[in-house]
Each structure stands twice: as structure tokens, then as C-alpha cells.
Amino acid sequence: MMHRRRRSLFDILDEYFSRAEMLLERAFESGWDEFSSCIEPLSNVFVGTSDVIITIDMPYVDRESVRVEIRGDVMEVFARTERPICLDEMGLRHRMGRFNSYRAVLRIPVPVDKDRMETRLKRGILEIRLPRLS
């Protein structure tokens, strides 16, 4: 008979506080890289029964510059804008600056068939459909 080692209360608390610290750091990241003039767009990952649908908000994007790469369970999306965008134009009054590209790095939570990926850009929303592997 094999006995599982019980975790001590201190191990559980250490893990809890390290995860809480990581979440806090993530919550206050800006999503804007001043040096490369790149901003992280809003995104959503929806996992359905037959496919995964990812939507990314990319207003003023140049259609020809959209690049989607999948490595393992991580998807990286990069696109340049048609022209430099001032944060002021997007309603941000508390910060000054410009950006000319978008970059999103997303984790895909289930196995997908990346060879059958479909993308569509309409009204500034990039929609990526990935069929799930069974």
C-alpha cells in the first residue's frame, strides 16, 4: 500500500501567496510597450464543443500585416496599424503616447488543428477559428 505525503500548511500557504502575487502583477501590467510602440489588444477565447473561437479587437489595422503563429498551446498575433494611433484618439486621457502595432500572446486551452485555422477581419475585429482535435 502506497501512502501519499500530505502537504503541510506552510507549503499550501507558500503556494497560495506566490500565486496571489503573480495574479496581482498580471493585473497591473500596462499592456503597452512604449519602446516598440506596440499595444496589447483586448481579446477573448471561447472554447466550444467543436472549435475554439478567438476574437481580438484591432481597430485601424492594416489587413496585409496580420500575422498569426501557433507554437504548441501558445498563439501569437501581430499586426501593424494603417497609421500611428494616439492614445488620446481612443479616449485615454490619463496617458500620452502613440502606437503603430498590436501584439497579443494567448494560451489555447485545448488541443486544436492549426492547419485548418480560419481567420476573418471585419470592422476592426479579428476572428480566428480553430477546429478542436478529438
Image (cartoon, rainbow, N blue to C red):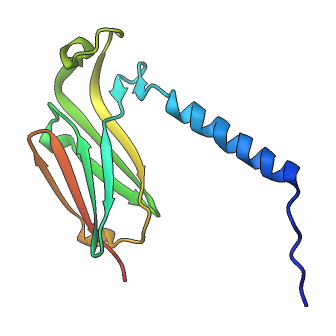
On screen, residue 10 above or below 112: above
Q: Residue 86 location in percent, x, y? A: 23, 14
Outermost residue on the left side: it is 123
Residue 31 quadrant: top left
Image quadrant where one finds the N terminus: bottom right
**Is 65 in front, or is 127?**
127
Q: Is residue 77 left or right of residue 74?
A: left
Q: Quadrant of residue 8?
A: bottom right
Residue drawn at x 26%, y 44% as measured from the top left: 56
Q: Residue at x 42, y 72 (%)?
A: 111
Quadrant in the picture for the C terminus: bottom left
- 95 up-or-down from 5: above or below: above
Q: Report the residue at 17% width, 33% height from top.
A: 59
Q: Position of residue 21 (x, y in %)?
A: 66, 35
Residue 54 locus on image (x, y percent): 28, 55
- Which residue is found at the position 28% from the left and 30% from the top? 101
> Which of the two residues, 24 or 66, is positioned nearer the viewer here?
24
Left or right: where 27 falls relative to 98: right
